[in-house]
Image (cartoon, grey):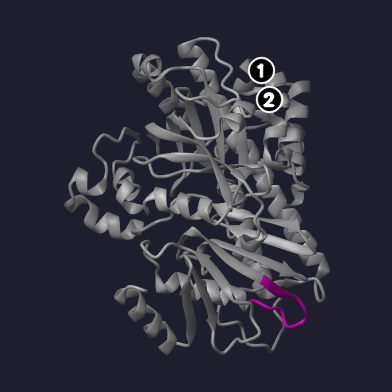
Amino acid sequence: MQPNHLLRLLRALARQGLDVQYNNQSYSVRWLDSPNAPIAEVLLPENLPVEAKALKQLASLATARHPAGGHVCRVCATPDFHPGDAGVAIGSVVETLGQVIPAAVGSDINCGMRLHVADLSVEQFLAQRDRFVELMKGDFFFGKRDVTMTAQTMQTLFQNGVVGWLDAMLDAPTGSVVQSDLNQLARESDRIFLNGSMSGHTRWAPEELIPAAGMVRDGGLATIGGGNHFVEVQWIEHVENRTLAYQWGVREGQLAFMIHSGSRHVGKYIGGMWRDRAQALWPERLKYPDSRLFPLSCASHPESVSDYLQAEATAANYAFVNRLLLAELLRLRLRQVYGDLEAPLVYDLPHNITLPEGQGWVTRKGACPAHVGQPVIIPGSMGTPSYLLMGLGNPDWCCSASHGAGRLRSRFDLSRKGNQESEDELGLTGVDCITLRQERRIEEAPAAYKPITPVIDAQVQAELVQLVARMRPILTFKA
């Protein structure tokens, strides 16, 4: 039986023309005036809140269709589902045929997760915690990192991602990478989704980052970024699937290092460019879609579809290398403080990306691929556990999983009211957050997020993923 508050919400949405049904842990939603659009599905337990705005955004995404040809085949959303600022709900997954939708990715292209483990106990880490933190603050916050590279290396980074960057670095290492084990980085490239390499091109990169010659000092590389991005030190509290964990090099009691960051200013530059281009290419004399989502059609502008995918890949390549360099700075400091640690990579996977799947494309916004046998990394908040899982390739949910717990309260709400709430009310008691701006602690407090356990349980029960290990936070860096 549906709770009264949910029934009231469904009736209110029906009066606005939105047909919403709830059954067996999932919502089905569609605009009544768009009967030809696919029904959008949201995997969301009834004890978790749902916002009308997010349901409307998902139903509108399902209606995105270019008049020259191209349509949405399927739309679904993961349990971290909540409204997005740019008209597309976070947690949305959309399968398209004959068209791509740049707005469904947005500007945080290839925001993603990276996970390393180290044979270091919590006690050993905490004994040198202050020294380690000060070194990392210098790298992450005070610009002491050195990620200088040649113009040629930067160009191949944009074109070929980790594979191209690493090949160039093996020939002529620069910056702090000269201290890195480049052979280890090469071995680990097969633990990155798509090897961290997509088909990009320098023509989409910001001009100042691709000079013809000389050295490039990019202030955006190896930076965490704002919003929900972080670098977190964790400990592996429990291993559920010991066979898989062993294969992936994960054991109880180890430390884990989780990185959540994306393409930074490069993604903002490319995402903004293609938001404007997609709108400019909309057929003249035709009304703009109510959703303000402008697909690119293979029928009318096939070159623009190819160009957009190449541009998105260019930003994605930058994001893969950004996470690698963040991890490498961390690994170098670990070795400086704690001795010769391998700290191997477990996996690196993207969110906010368009990928060819089936006969068309699947675009994930605040969701990640969860193909059969693939590692999946889902963080909680800085006061709750994070999880390592294995994808099960569930076709009913477009082989996808959530990218986190999902926001419960907006940053604006917390910036207005958070200072009036206690540490306990915000969930911040005992949380070790390293930041230069104290308002970030409040904006990203655990109370800002949905409880992670039901989000994970729903996906396990629906057979999107299988649990491998659970990690507890020790300390979190927030820029």
- The residue indicated by pointer 2 is 185
| Residue 292: in magenta span | no
Q: On the rendered structure, is 455 left or right of 267?
A: left
Tally of numbered tags: 2
**Residue at image coords 66%, 67%:** 101
Classify the position of the C terminus by image quarter. top left
Q: Main secondary structure of the magenta part?
A: loop
Residue 253 in the image: state x and y as whole percent. 45, 22
The CA span between labels 2 and 1 is 7 Å
- The residue indicated by pointer 1 is 181
Tag 2–tag 1 contact (CB < 8 Å): yes
Amino acid under disc 1: Asp
Q: Secondary structure at mark 2?
A: helix
Amino acid under disc 2: Leu
**Residue at image coords 78%, 71%:** 98
User: Which of 170/458 is in front?
Assistant: 458
Crowdedness near tag 2: few (<14), some (14–19) or many (≥20) residues, C-alpha within 10 Å: some
User: Which of 370/424 is in front?
Assistant: 370
Residue 77 in the image: state x and y as whole percent. 54, 63
Q: Quadrant of residue 319?
A: top right
Residue 472 in the image: state x and y as whole percent. 40, 34
User: Which of 290/239 is in front?
Assistant: 239
Residue 315 seen from this side: yes
Residue 468 in the image: state x and y as whole percent. 54, 37
**Residue at image coords 69%, 28%:** 188
Q: On the rendered structure, is 90 left or right of 51?
A: right
| Residue 68: in magenta span | yes
Numbered range of the magenta stretch: 64-73
